[in-house]
Amino acid sequence: MVKTYADLYLDARKALLPSEGMYAGNVARELVCAASGKTQEELIADRGLYASEEICTKVERFVHRHLAGEPTAYLLGQWDFADMTLTITPDVLIPRDDTMAVTELAIKKAMFLPQNPRILDLCTGSGCIGLAIARRVKDAKLTLADISTDALRVAKKNVTDLHLGGRVSCVQVDAMKPAAPFLGKFDLIVANPPYVTTAEMAQLDASVRDYEPHLALHGGADGLDFFRAIVRNFTPALRPGGCMAFEFGLGQDPAVGTILENAGFTILEWRQDYSGIIRAVLAEHSWTGER
């Protein structure tokens, strides 16, 4: 049965109201726009027009999937982060506001690095951190690295869509293994690695546990496996005086700080997320020498 766009929106909003409450209208609008390919402005202008049966069916399917717990970002196929609209698929984590802490920390440091700095974004996923740095630091050369070829496919699309191919490259890298010589040396390494503990994995919200990639979530029994591995394997890939910046989970800051300090790093700054939780760290390696 075909409906006007106004009726499509109202029916979707009604179905979403019990779970979304005051946000039901926003979610309904996003789903109708995604199903129809219209912008929000076009949706308002065309509210009296009839949608095709295909679009009506697609909206109903989107609403059903959303009510089943599938995250909106995967339904829409894109998500906004740091003034960018990124392609997002179930092969990558959905960028969250929490990640702005390490992103802002890395951007602040990158702005004061030597000219044409080389920066590595490990466990890049969608590329959100590295791409945000590249957009703000115009002379920076970014390498986006991930073990997942599917994640790299998403990152590469985002590089292309943002017209950053001249300064941003994507490579397959296993953060749990020593850095390959072909990567060269970096002024800054930033990472949002998997840091959910084994016990926490079972307690995750269903929208995360059942839809987002476990490869990008599980950080081992204590959630710290990747921090230990990255510091061990990638410190040699830093230029003298180079820095590492990490995102980590709630309450992991003392342990991450200890891992860095035991490897010869000096903590430069901790950064809180928008909820006031310590979420990121910037640390400088103490060695000196020729660049």
Image (cartoon, rainbow, N blue to C red):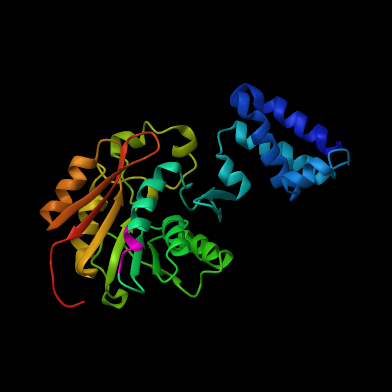
* Residue 218, quarter of picture: top left
Q: Main secondary structure of the magenta part?
A: loop
Estimate the x, y position of residue 227 in percent, counting from the top left: 24, 52
Residue at horizontal 77 percent and vertical 29 percent from the top:
10
* Residue 266, quarter of picture: bottom left
Pick out the residue farthest to the front. 112
Q: Nearer the viewer, residue 87 or 40?
A: 40
Quadrant the N terminus occupies:
top right
- Left or right relative to 207: residue 68: right
* Residue 288, quarter of picture: bottom left
Pick out the residue farthest to the top. 18
Estimate the x, y position of residue 34 in percent, counting from the top left: 69, 46
Q: Which residues are magenta?
A: 109-113
Quadrant the C terminus occupies:
bottom left
Estimate the x, y position of residue 23 in percent, counting from the top left: 61, 29
Q: Is residue 1 magenta?
A: no
Residue at horizontal 44 percent and vertical 38 percent from the top:
209
Q: How many numbered marks does the figure carry?
A: 0
Q: Is residue 182 above or below residue 42?
A: below
- Left or right relative to 259: residue 153: right
Residue at horizontal 18 percent and vertical 41 percent from the top:
254
Q: Is residue 40 above or below residue 231?
A: above
Q: Nearer the viewer, residue 47 or 271?
A: 271
